[in-house]
Image (spheres, helix red, strand yellow):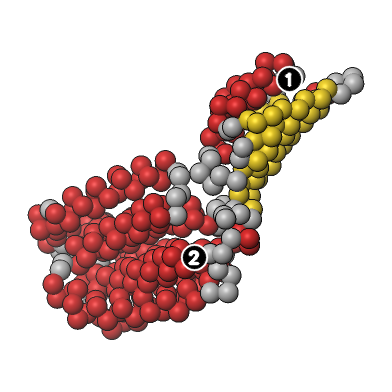
Amino acid sequence: MDTRSQHLLFDAVCERDFTAADIEHIKDVIEKNLTVVSKIEHKFTPHGETIVFILAESHFSLHTYPENRFISLDIYVCNMETDLKKIVNEISKVVPFEKVDQRFLSRGKIGTPVTSNNLNLIYLVTVITACCSILYELLLAQALSTTMGNTALRYNTTIGLYIAAMGFGALLYKKFVKRDVLEEFVKYELLLSLVGGSAPVLALVFDYAFNNIAKSSGVPYFSNWIQMPLFTLNHVLIVVIGFLSGLELPLLIDMGKKFDKRKGSYVLAYDYFGTLIGAILFPIMILPQLHIFTIGYVVSAMNILVALFVMIKLKIDNNKYKLFIAIMLIGWALLIFNSDTVNEMIIQKFYFGGQP
């Protein structure tokens, strides 16, 4: 038997005094979304009331303190498919709250043996995302060696900065990740896809822009006035990708621990393995076959597909992220299928068109 359950603790201060209609609305929302078996209601003297519903899913309770315009709701359901956020939103549409303190808790996990399927999913996702992250950096190193020269220096600097930025990401993980780890993982996959896939093109655009600045201002292109800000912008891209990857790894570890506290930390080993795969495949198989811009589109699409896969498999319900995934997946797919034309346009405009 599955002992997992959801628990909502909701405290709020209303903008105005409660009315009987407000209480009836809350009761109607509960009865519409959940199965009420029995009801108990008690009014206090001189004011206030407590309402308890026994549900087929478990229980619901409501307590009011009219003199403070304060209300407290407690909803505990054993059905993991029930959307408690939807219930809160329906209540908030009619009852205007001034202050809200709500907590959505997952209960009963320790009572249900966890199958290895979800943990294996996290391991697979870790390998793919680690592979994608190192590919973004290798792509950027290759692009920078084209625009800035000195290939050995670009690769060494890129990898060094990437690892350092990953460390900062891991260090600041708790400051940036404060919500549900599954939803946060999807968010950072979307950001990585956007920044990582566009980074090689942005490196070329930056070079083109500073070429034009040098021409229009009369400042030599290879002077420090041009090269220092160009160097900074290019390496900010490296740091951003590394920082996001540094947030991604602790997220994956926490996701693994969510399903098995003992084996969740194994995620680190799979991350190293994924990095190795990307580092080997890039020079041997990927770079000789595809243009660096096209590789960026493909790797970004992989990140988006991973986010979609996680949302489906782990039943993450977030319409905003679903919309972003759809838009970005269509965008990357169009770029992949029209990559020859798009890449030629980019090169003609920003490379040959930007030569000093």
Q: Secondary structure at mark 2?
A: loop
For the N terminus, give its image quadrant: bottom right
Give the amino acid type for the residue marked by disc 2 in the picture. Thr
Disc 2 or disc 1, which is closer to the eye?
2
Of residue 34 and residue 88, the one placed in the foreground of this image is 34
Of residue 42 and residue 13, the one placed in the foreground of this image is 42
The residue that mark 2 highlights is 115
Residue 241 found in image quarter: bottom left
Contact flag, marks 2 and 1 (Cβ < 8 Å): no
Labels 2 and 1: the sequence-earlier one: 1
Question: What is the residue that sits farthest to the right in this orientation?
Answer: 45
Question: Does residue 99 lie above or below 333 as drawn?
Answer: above
Looking at the image, residue 97 sits to the left or right of residue 212; the answer is right
Residue 343 in sight from this viewpoint = yes
Q: Residue at x 61, y 37 (%)?
A: 56
Q: Secondary structure at mark 1?
A: loop
Q: Residue at x 77, y 31 (%)?
A: 63
Looking at the image, residue 12 sits to the left or right of residue 139; the answer is right
Q: Residue at x 24, y 48 (%)?
A: 331
- List x then y, in percent, for residue 139: 27, 70
**Could you give the CA–CA distance between mark 2 and mark 1, rounded to whole angstroms?**
47 Å
Give the amino acid type for the residue marked by disc 1 in the picture. Phe
The residue that mark 1 highlights is 18
Residue 248 in sight from this viewpoint = no
Looking at the image, residue 191 sits to the left or right of residue 89; the answer is left
Question: Does residue 22 lie above or below 218 as drawn?
Answer: above
Of residue 266 and residue 292, the one placed in the foreground of this image is 266
Residue 350 found in image quarter: bottom left
Q: Residue at x 45, y 79 (%)?
A: 269
Question: Does residue 51 lie above or below 159 as drawn?
Answer: above
- List x then y, in percent, for residue 114: 53, 64
Mark 2 burial class by Cα count in 10 Å: few <14, some 14-19, many 20+:
few
